[in-house]
Amino acid sequence: MSSYRAVLDVIERIQNAMIVAFFVLTIVIVSFQVLNRFWFHWPVVWTSDAAVLCFIWLSFLTASVAVRKYGHFRVGVLIDLPWRRHGRRNLELLSLVLIILLSLVLVIEGTRVALEGLREISPGIQISMIWAYASVPVCSLTAILFAVEKTIEQLSSAAPSSEAPMEEEN
Amino acid sequence: MDSVILLFGTFAALLVLGVPIAFALGLSSLLIIWIEGLPISILAQTAYRGLDNFILLAVPFFLIVGVLMNVGTITERLLDLAGAMFGKTRGALAKVNIVASMLFAGLSGSSVADVAGIGSVLIPAMIKQGYPRAFAVAVTAASSTIGIIIPPSIFLAVYGAVGDVSIGALFLGGAVPGLLIGATQLIYCHYLARTQDHPRGAPFSFGRLGKAAWRGALPFGVTVVILGGIIGGIFTATEAAAVAVLYVLALAGIGYRALTINSLRGAIMEAAGHLGPTMLCVAMGAVFAWVMAFLQVPQMVGDLVKGMDLSPTMVLLFIMVLFVIVGTFESGVASIIIFLPIIQPMADAAGLHPVHVGVIVCVTLALGLITPPYGLCLFIAARIGKMSVDRAFVATLPWIVLFLAVDVILVLVPDTVLLLPRLVVPEFMGG
């Protein structure tokens, strides 16, 4: 388990670095779009597509990391009840198994969609759409790895349990 | 009809079992896609397309503006400004809390940043000054809802993008409702301060107010950039939000010298922590909305409401009640994406103005931020105040009733929402 966790630590560090990079890139590209329109007047057609590409990666990367942090929003009706230890743990396990199930479907079907994207070219940035569509299967795969880690933690008796209701937008 | 019941039944069951909302949306949609014999690839395709929208980039930008305001001492300056306004009146610090939220709301589009930034300073300060703990938590949570109503607002930006309604008009439409909610909260706070003998503030001084106003003036450049840019047709909402990020970065980093590379990285990661769960809800919400459209749910609801022969006001009240319920269980952004296809035909058939409907929906969803089981601002405020969510909710109940009363007034008197956009941007308001 410790070596598995170490691998996931590396994956999370890489994802965090990508999150910072995509966040900064998105801001820079959109700001460039504004500056360009007002000052330079260059005909730029790639900024919107490039910014959206960064944003989509940013969204799926942050969603994947949130699985490891039990960071996804949920409604704590049953899970917050004063269960005996196993009641709460079983609900957590069910939740994790369902997260793995949906992520697995996204990996399989997302890969299919991404491969079809090989034939499509982004009109703005003139790159294959596989670079955009790949965000779904890649991040779903890491979400599965994180969810498996949490499942193992829940199954082992010394496992830390998740904190109740989680955080969002607004 | 069986599939519709199965879709909503599965979604509700998964939510109750504690499955994260985004995954509950995806799994219930997946079940219907599978049962109806549709290609499973719809799941991945529609989830991707749900995020493939330039306007949604405003969400991370507004989130990071809020976090940067907390990191970059801007929140402190707003608190000083609000604190200088009330002098020795009873309950001054509670009123400061509300006014600070209104000021914060004018700069940030996020209530979470509001409650985290203002609450972490004012809840401990209020408790130390002798306010009841539950009251300190309740007033902070309740006033944070204003953050998402007074423009800029993530909810209004997303509503405008998804519903094809002018975001500038929606932002202007949210201004008066936000101020009304703030004003009623101040009046209620004043009443409580007198009846419950809340502590007084420091003596008023024009010098202090002037100094605080001077220190707190520059951040309001963000409001000018966002509202001026969008309403003036200079920027799109996304571009305005990006320029606002640059402005706050320059102000906090160069002007106030309050940012380091590490704190900036921390701010990005904090915003990212909120972004991922929200955006997965949006992606899976798009799949859920697709499945609903496939099952013709919007038409069913539209026909149902038409059959009831309701007046426009009753239709809007119905929409309000729907979003009160939805908002207690769902993330606001996801609620907009999922339910907009249902309510829009209904509102159009009733002849309601889209800006009026949009503002009512977003104001009502703001209430969901302080109502369990999914009351995020309430959770954060309770956590800061070190009290249970149950007790915090009970203390917040009167504020919720107050909020609902204002919401009903906004429904009954459309000009509370529509007058300002009609005056400023008549070209976006139609006849």
Image (cartoon, coloured by chain):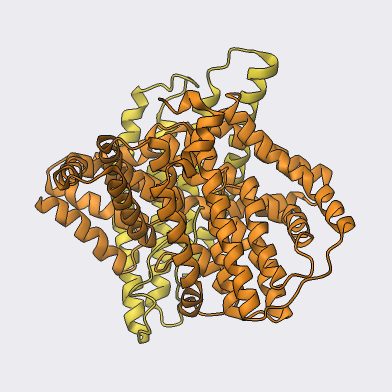
Chain colours: A yellow, B orange
Which residue is painted at 50% across and 79% down in the image?
B388
Please determine whether, in this image, residue A7 is positioned above or below residue B45.
below
Which residue is painted at 34% across and 23% down in the image?
A119
Residue toward you, A38 or B284 = A38
Which residue is painted at 24% across and 65% down in the image?
B13
Please determine whether, in this image, residue A87 is positioned above or below residue B417.
below
Q: x, y (%) of residue B148?
A: 53, 51
Q: Quadrant of residue A74?
A: bottom left
Query: In this image, B345 relative to A14: left or right?
Result: left
| Residue furthest to the bottom | A84
Tell me if I can see residue B395 in this picture. yes
Q: How many marks?
A: 0
Query: In this image, B187 relative to B87: left or right?
Result: left
Tell me if I can see residue A107 in this picture. no
| Residue furthest to the right | B207
Query: In this image, B147 relative to B202: left or right?
Result: left
Q: x, y (%) of residue A3?
A: 50, 65
Which residue is painted at 48% across and 71% down in the image?
B398
Please determine whether, in this image, residue B112 is positioned above or below residue B410.
below
Query: In this image, B70 relative to A158: left or right?
Result: right
Q: x, y (%) of residue B112?
A: 56, 57
Q: x, y (%) of residue A120?
A: 36, 23
